[in-house]
Image (cartoon, rainbow, N blue to C red):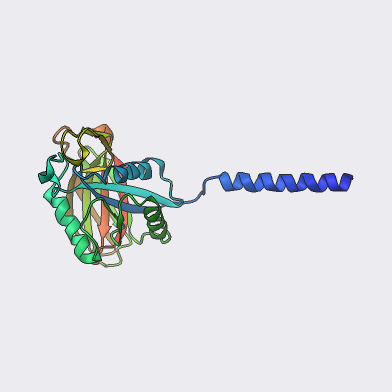
Amino acid sequence: MKILTLSVAIFLLAIAFTVKNQARPPSGPRTPVLVELFTSEGCSSCPPADRLLIELKQKQPVPNAQVIALGQHVDYWNSTGWKDRFSSPQFTARQQEYADRLSDGPYTPQMVIDGTASLVGNDAGGVSRAITRAAAAAKPVQVELSQAGDQVQIQLRGLANSSPEVFFALVEDGLESKVKAGENDGVTLHHVAVTRELRSLGRASGDAWTGMAAVKLDGGIRKEKSQALVFVQNPGGKVVGVNTIALR
């Protein structure tokens, strides 16, 4: 009887240990993954994708991946009754480049993962799997960022003479719009990682590269809600390095 009781106790302890370890979030380094969302406040299927981007950025739910979000509002919905104040033809053109390269799109909402995988932006399961695949391999280019006044200092390592293009973005969180026309009439929309500026810093060369990017907080952009983001993209479109820094 004592042997049976001891066996049961050991069995229960084993179950408790297993459950405890299964519930524990995975530890270890996270690979940065760039998640670009092409969206519009005039598109009725976009709010779920906007909410998904918020969850990805704030909760970081994908094991071993550090999601770095980049929300880009396209302008081709502006003629349907509501003008998206965050929209730009620049983002529409960037989405078209992806459509040509990946043979998918353009459409909204669309998410592009590390420049190589295109998915419907409100497909939470598909997006999660794509991020997991992207995070499986470390980025070859290390992006180090620091801030000095109104400048962001950039240092890249591990380029291996590949001459990728370096992009600088300024993104803002905690933005809200009360839509009064179009497909989302009457809906209050919430956004994170809204791209307020996106520009190319040219192509890097050599094995290491350093550069500077000026930070301009125009149009009421709030510093305390904003981050600078730098990503490195090879000629084929793959993101080979990315990092972000909160502004101070």
For residue 248, say whether it is visible: no
Q: Is residue 180 left or right of residue 50?
A: left
Residue furthest to the left: 79
Quadrant position of residue 177: top left
Q: Residue furthest right?
A: 1
Q: Residue at x 22, y 66 (%)?
A: 101
Where is residue 4 shown, x and y percent of the image?
85, 47
Image position, residue 25 (x, y; %): 52, 46
Compare residues 230 and 7 and report the one nearer the observer: 7
- As rendered, which of 61 and 127 lies closer to the eye? 127
Specify whether 6 is left or right of 134: right
Q: Nearer the viewer, residue 84 or 80?
A: 80
Image quarter hosting the C terminus = top left
- In the image, residue 182 sits, relative to residue 67, either above or below, namely above
Percent x, y of residue 33? 35, 54
In which quadrant will I find the N terminus? top right
Q: Residue at x 29, y 43 (%)?
A: 50
Count of labels in the image: 0
The answer to whether any part of residue 88 appears in the image is: yes
**196 in relation to 165, above or below:** above
The residue depicted at 41 percent of the width and 41 percent of the height is 59
* Position of residue 182 in the picture relative to residue 115 (left or right): left
Image x and y of residue 195, in percent: 21, 44
Quarter of the image where one finds residue 84: top left
Is 53 or 206 nearer to us in this picture? 53
